[in-house]
Amino acid sequence: MTAEPLVRVRGLRKVFGEGDAAAVVLRGVDLDLSRGEMATLLGPSGSGKSTLLTILGTLLRPSEGLHHMLGQDLSTASDAERTRFRNKHIGFVFQFHHLLPDLTALENVMMPAATSRGKETASMRSRAAELLDAVGLSDRRDYRPAALSGGQRQRVAVARSLMNEPPLVLADEPTGNLDRHSADQVMALLDQINRDTGTCFLISTHDEHIAKHCRRHIELLDGALV
Ligand SMILES: Nc1ncnc2c1ncn2[C@@H]1O[C@H](COP(=O)(O)OP(=O)(O)OP(=O)(O)O)[C@@H](O)[C@H]1O
């Protein structure tokens, strides 16, 4: 018997709207992601990359199809179960960092743990400090996002995505807002984390140069995998 992959998706469809206004955005996607994989999701604008990532992140339900992660059937899970699952097992990095402006870098990194466990603890603080160290920002712990560069903010967002040690991190155009040098730094960081911890990354990008950092390329064209 082969072990079930980290993520298994079969016949995934997403339709927005109804009747004449219906737009079929994903038309039957089959995809497996294994633990420790580092993959890019490529495709032209409008091909459905963000929609697929949002569904894999349980932030959106598919119209049809099967979605399993860690052997759990998320297609039939309740909203509350999906939220609990997401907080525990999935990290996110977005194009715009979505850091909270009033919190320091350290407090932002701690957020996912504080959210799922109710309150901050000393062990959360030390894990967040270790993560900031790992992304090269231990000297910026007490800075607020406005006092950080774009690349530094994105590195804080990467640290935050890892706070709960998720087996899967979904990154939607994580370098889309960065210059080439900062983009390469962020990609090298993701690559390093992937090798060190076995975290699976699925990274959407338009940029072929960024895709070179990944060993697997998944391509969407008009809502279907190529
Ligand atoms: N909530 C929504 N309601 C209706 N249509 C939507 C919705 N969200 C996305 N779409 C449509 O789905 C299609 C795919 O969008 P999506 O954002 O997934 O593409 P993408 O490949 O990530 O594009 P980009 O690279 O430009 O970010 C687009 O045509 C978009 O207009």
Image (spheres, rainbow, N blue to C red):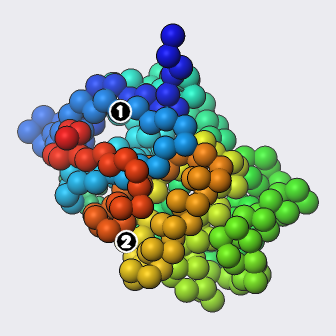
Residue 79 visible in rendering: no
- Which residue is label 1 attached to? 31
Name the quarter where the C terminus is drawn: top left
Q: Nearer the viewer, residue 188 or 90?
A: 188
Q: Is residue 80 left or right of residue 132?
A: left
Q: Is residue 15 left or right of residue 108?
A: left
Mark 1 vs 2: CB contact within 8 A: no
Across and down, in percent, residue 211 comes to 35, 60
Mark 2 falls on what kind of element? loop
Q: Residue furthest top?
A: 1
Neighbours of disc 2 within 10 Å: few (<14), some (14-19), many (20+):
some
Which residue is depicted at the point 51% across and 10% down?
1
Using the image, determine if residue 154 lies above or below residue 48: below
- Which residue is label 2 attached to? 176
Q: Is residue 164 left or right of residue 5?
A: right
Which residue is depicted at the point 59% across and 52% down?
195
